[in-house]
């Protein structure tokens, strides 16, 4: 029969040895990760710091630093009607794109969760807008939405309606940009929501059906509350991407003044504006602040949903 004291000593030595091995493994992991962390930090943080410094200076692309002028660049940006026009368009573009892409993604996700012929092929086909290069997708949309020769207006005139000049009327330009954005974004919503729906507890739906709930009540009172945390994260994340979107409005409208997001405004100001780099950097910093607020809310939603 073994001595209890000896057994306790052996167990303690093994635990100490295991703790030491864990500490060595942790230190090895940290040491291996440090070069990548330093490199990525330098590549991402340094340009951001440099952009913030440029926003307080006078300068152009050819000669970035021509003197410290304080908050003059910010005052110039905030006094520019073009900036506030970009802010208004960005808000409409982001909200409209998020709502339309979410509704489309959710509807298709609910539909594709049911058994149907060729379901796998349909799923792959619906993901294509997400992987098509933006210049290809937006060129196709521009061709379909152009004036009378466009496919959409050809259909409208064929059924006796008047053509819509999407890129001449500011209101229709916003609608066209939102539709194109939703087309690009709904596959991400679709994939995320399908993954969430596949993990739901079917017993709750069965219980609701036994209680006599119809399809709408089962969705609103059972399904939607369960997908709400993920939906909230998707809303905030897609809003961030929409605010940060450059390709969709620029390529679709050929840089129309009626469809400039804050990112497009920042680019144009940096390249073509007087004291361009300074005012463009100030606009970029203001955009960064907006994205930072949205990122904060996304983290809060993650915690509220238990996805820490």
Image (tube, rainbow, N blue to C red):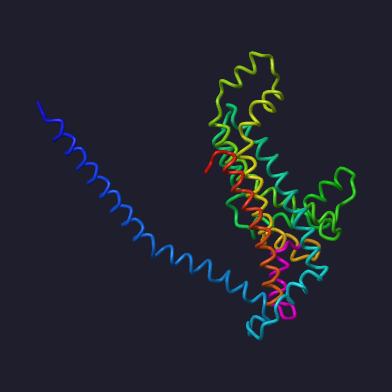
**Residue 231 locus on image (x, y percent):** 64, 40
Residue 72, quarter of the rendered image: bottom right
Q: Nearer the viewer, residue 14 or 293?
A: 14
* Residue at horizontal 77 percent and vertical 51 percent from the top: 151
Above/below status of 233 relative to 274: above
- Main secondary structure found in the magenta portion: helix
Above/below status of 165 relative to 269: above
**Residue 236 locus on image (x, y percent):** 65, 48
- Specify whether 306 is left or right of 28: right
Q: Nearer the viewer, residue 148 or 177?
A: 177
Residue sitting at the far left: 1
Give yes or no for residue 238 being in the magenta stretch: no
- In the image, the segment drawn in magenta is 260-276
* Residue at horizontal 62 percent and vertical 53 percent from the top: 295
Position of the N terminus, as image quadrant, is top left
Residue sitting at the far front: 5
**Residue 7 locus on image (x, y percent):** 16, 34
Q: Nearer the viewer, residue 173 or 213?
A: 213
């Amino acid at each position: 029969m073994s001595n209890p004291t000896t057994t306790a000593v052996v167990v303690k030595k093994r635990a100490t040895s295991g703790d030491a091995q864990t500490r060595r493994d942790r230190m090895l992991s940290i040491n291996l990760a440090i070069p990548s962390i330093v490199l990525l930090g330098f590549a991402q943080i340094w340009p951001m710091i440099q952009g913030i410094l440029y926003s307080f200076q006078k300068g152009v692309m050819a000669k970035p630093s021509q003197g410290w002028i304080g908050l003059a660049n910010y005052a110039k940006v905030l006094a520019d009607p073009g900036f506030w026009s970009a802010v208004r368009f960005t808000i409409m573009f982001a909200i409209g794109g998020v709502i339309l892409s979410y509704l489309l993604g959710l509807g298709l996700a609910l539909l594709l969760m049911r058994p149907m012929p060729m379901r796998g092929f349909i799923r792959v086909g619906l993901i294509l807008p997400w992987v098509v290069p933006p210049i290809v997708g937006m060129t196709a949309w521009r061709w379909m939405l152009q004036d009378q020769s466009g496919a959409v207006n050809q259909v409208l005139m064929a059924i006796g309606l008047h053509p819509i000049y999407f890129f001449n009327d500011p209101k229709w330009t916003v609608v066209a940009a939102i539709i194109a954005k939703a087309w690009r974004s709904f596959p991400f919503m679709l994939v995320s929501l399908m993954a969430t729906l596949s993990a739901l507890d079917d017993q709750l739906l069965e219980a609701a059906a036994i209680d006599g709930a119809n399809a709408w009540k089962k969705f609103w009172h059972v399904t939607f509350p369960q997908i709400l945390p993920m939906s909230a994260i998707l809303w905030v994340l897609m809003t961030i991407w929409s605010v940060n979107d450059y390709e969709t409005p620029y390529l679709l409208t050929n840089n129309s003044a009626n469809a400039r997001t804050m990112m497009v405004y920042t680019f144009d100001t940096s390249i073509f504006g007087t004291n361009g780099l300074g005012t463009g950097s100030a606009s970029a910093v203001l955009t960064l602040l907006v994205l930072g607020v949205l990122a904060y809310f996304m983290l809060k939603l993650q915690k509220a949903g238990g996805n820490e």
